[in-house]
Image (tube, rainbow, N blue to C red):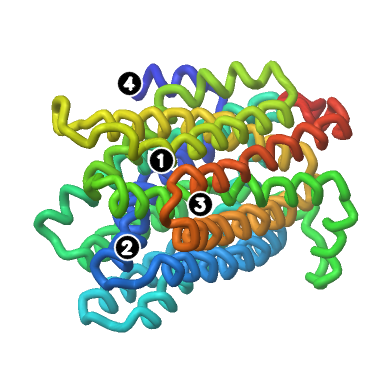
Amino acid sequence: MHVPSFRRSFQGYDRRVWTLFYGRIMTATGFAMVIPFLSMYLHNDLGIRMSLVGLLLLVTSLVGSMGNIIGGEIADRLGRKNIMTAALLWRAAAFVLIAIAIGTEQSYLVIAGLVTLSSFGGSLFDPASNAMIADVVAPAKRLEAYGLLRIGQNIGWAAGPMVGGILSIWLPFSTLFILSSAATMGVAVFIYLNITESLDRGKVGGRFRLTDIGGVTRDSMFMAFCLVSISLFMMFGQMSSSYAVYSTDRLSVTESQVALLWTWNGILVIFLQMPLARWISRFRMSSMVAAGSLMYAVGYGMVGMAPIFSSGELAFGMSERYLYLVLNMTIVTMGEMFVSPASMNLVANMSPENERGRYMGVFGLASSIGFSLGPFTGSVILDVFYSSDVLVWALIGMLGVVAAVGYTILGKKLGAERDSSTPRA
């Protein structure tokens, strides 16, 4: 993919969009070098039970959800640039502390506390970033712009696990956190030097009151959308938790092979996200999010059938079972490419101009609750129904069905104006 020709296909975008795009590549690469392997490290290396691993993911995501709310409020008052820079510096510092804790063999509670600290700081970033996109991109182009950020994030998610898996052969896990911290710190400097503020100071609200957030709850359609989204994001949270642990623990898949599945996920998004974003822009956003939810349900629901396939090597170190997992990941990734830009576009359409950070923050709260409940619920299901692979993944897949039904009902009540990829400016 030649960079100049790639950029020419998005001519007219504000420079800040490209700065966020390149920043997403670096932060996602650094993050994906370490965090996807954390569940496996805690379970396989430290012997922590999966229910406790799931509990950690639950707590960190719930704490992160508070960061989404706070980050959105600060972004609407102090500006998008300031909070994005501060969030990255916070995460970089937290990663250094995690590296020290792992390197000095601190207890599970110490590591868990630092991971939670990192989650809070990192969650301040997204509401400001997403609000800036809504600020600087025309409504008709927002779906593509959010898709572009998804491409940047998935370039990082494709490269990160591969780089982390290779480096882990020679370097201890703690050192990978140091490298990730350096990458995150570099992006903080890059954004600070290259982004100008997009917040219109003339539209900044007054002094913050807790009732301001409560005002969002009076937007019944938006709150219904957030509620349905919790079920969907419970599916999102399976990839680096239940899915990864199940693959290594029950299917005899190596950690490096799991990393390759994540890399495959990223590669698909890099090459297919933008064509799909342009295609789905012809349809109502609620329908596309519902379709993506069903793809998630099918992709994850099929995982329970993996044990019936042979684990014997066919070629290039791959087995029938592993190729089946590649198929599962492909279907899940298709769902992701439908859901991610369409859902963000819906939030941008629903939010008043002077409350974009707040709406993004509340949606971030819903997604964080889903992310937190997902790994915890998945790990409990794995522990309770350990002897029935099909039942485990059928139950997890049902979350996507619930989300699809909810979005379909919501779409019938949403007006075409808010449910379109090209609302009137």
Quadrant location of the N terminus? top left
Q: Disc 2 or disc 3, which is closer to the eye?
A: 3
**Disc 1 and disc 3: Cα gap in Å?**
25 Å
Q: Disc 2 or disc 1, which is closer to the eye?
A: 2
Q: Secondary structure at mark 3?
A: loop
Q: Are marks 1 and 3 in contact (CB under 8 Å)?
A: no
Question: Which three-letter amino acid code belongs to the residue tagged 4?
Answer: Met
Q: Quadrant of residue 152?
A: top left
Mark 4, residue position = 1
Image x and y of residue 288, in percent: 66, 27
59 lies left or right of 258: right
Q: Of label 2 and label 3, which has the lower sequence position?
A: 2
**Disc 1 and disc 4: Cα gap in Å?**
15 Å
Q: Of label 3 and label 4, which has the lower sequence position?
A: 4
Q: Secondary structure at mark 2?
A: helix
- The image shows residue 10, relative to residue 204, as above or below, that is above
Question: Which three-letter amino acid code belongs to the residue tagged 2?
Answer: Ser
Q: Of label 1 and label 3, which has the lower sequence position?
A: 1
